[in-house]
Structures are given as structure tokens and as C-alpha cells.
Image (cartoon, rainbow, N blue to C red):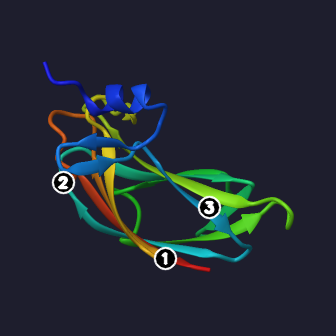
Amino acid sequence: MKEQLAELLVASHGQPVKWGDHVVHGFYEISGLAAGARLTIEFLCVVPPLPQSLALSCKGGRLEVNGQDLKEIGLWSDTVPALVVAVARPASRKRPLSVQLWNEWRDEDGVVQAWIGNAGMIIEEEEDHMILRCSNGEGEATFDDLVVEVTITR
């Protein structure tokens, strides 16, 4: 039986792993964000039937999303607009701010899942722009369950 992505990512202690021709991440971290940096997140593709989410977790500060000041947020495909802006709000000027991103989904019972089975992300990255191609943990790894574009305006 072929190892699942989650097992490989655990064995790598969270470092990206090789999966066929791809480098796969369990999460992605955007570091060195200054006060007021904007993450513009656009949902490009969501494969039904499971609702998908891009989760964001802020270290060293908070994110302002739709007028709310948050440490973490899940942007769910079945409730969020196609385009979302998150603004970085550092806790201190001396402390670096970073945001971790990963995919999560609700299984058939409505339970939020992440980092299990064949969950992972292929990241196509340019300077301040990236495409995250996410595979949820259900079934084979496909990397098209959730596709989002993230643009950073520093």
C-alpha cells in the first residue's frame, strides 16, 4: 500500500516532501509581513461535493478580515466571497509577523478535517504572488480540490 501524504509530511517534521513530480507542502508560511500588508485571496476552483477552506493563522499579530480582527480564520468555499482581503496587523513593530496557510475541508459528517490522508498543497510561487493547489485528504491526491490565488501587497 502506498504511503499517504500525511504520513510523509509527519515523517519530514512538516517540511515539504516529494510526491511524484511535485513538491508538496502541508502548510505554507508567508513571513516578514509589515503593518498594513494585504493578502488578497481569490478562490479559483472548488471541486464538490465537500466544502473546502483555506485556513490562515497569524503569528506575531492579527489579521483584519471584513472588519474583524482575527488570529485565525477559515475561509470556507460555501460561504466566503470569491475574493477576500486580509490586512496584517502586527502586535509590535519589533516582532516579525507571518501567516500560515493550509487547506481544510468538511467531511461527509460535517467534521472539519486537515492534515490527514492525502492532504497537501502544491505551490506555484512568484515574488508576491502564488497559486495554492490543494488536495484534501479524501481518496487519491489530486491537487485540484481547492485552488486559490494569493497576492501580497507589502
Rendering coords of residue 40 (x, y %): 48, 75
| Secondary structure type for disc 2 | loop
3 or 61: which is nearer to us? Answer: 3
Q: Which residue is mark 2?
A: 47
Residue picked out by circle 3: 31
Residue 67 visible within the image: no
Quarter placement of the N terminus = top left
Residue at image position (73%, 67%) is 89
Q: Nearer the viewer, residue 34 or 69?
A: 34
The numbered mark, 3 or 2, whose residue comes first in the sequence reads: 3
Q: How far apart are labels 3 and 1 at the CA level?
A: 11 Å
Q: Amino acid at mark 2?
A: Val
**Looking at the image, do the residues carrying marks 3 and 1 touch, with CB atoms under 8 Å apart?**
no
Most extreme residue toward the bottom is 153
> What element does badge 1 sit on?
loop
How crowded pointer 1 is (Cα within 10 Å; few <14, some 14-19, many 20+) is rated as few
Quadrant position of residue 26: top left
Name which residue lies at 81% across and 59% down: 95
Q: Hey, what amino acid is under mark 3?
A: Ser
Label 1 and label 2: CA atoms lie apart by 26 Å
Q: Is residue 106 above or below residue 129?
A: above
Q: Is residue 53 left or right of residue 22?
A: right
| Mark drawn on residue 29 | none
The disc placed on residue 128 is: 1
Residue type, mark 1 in image: Asp
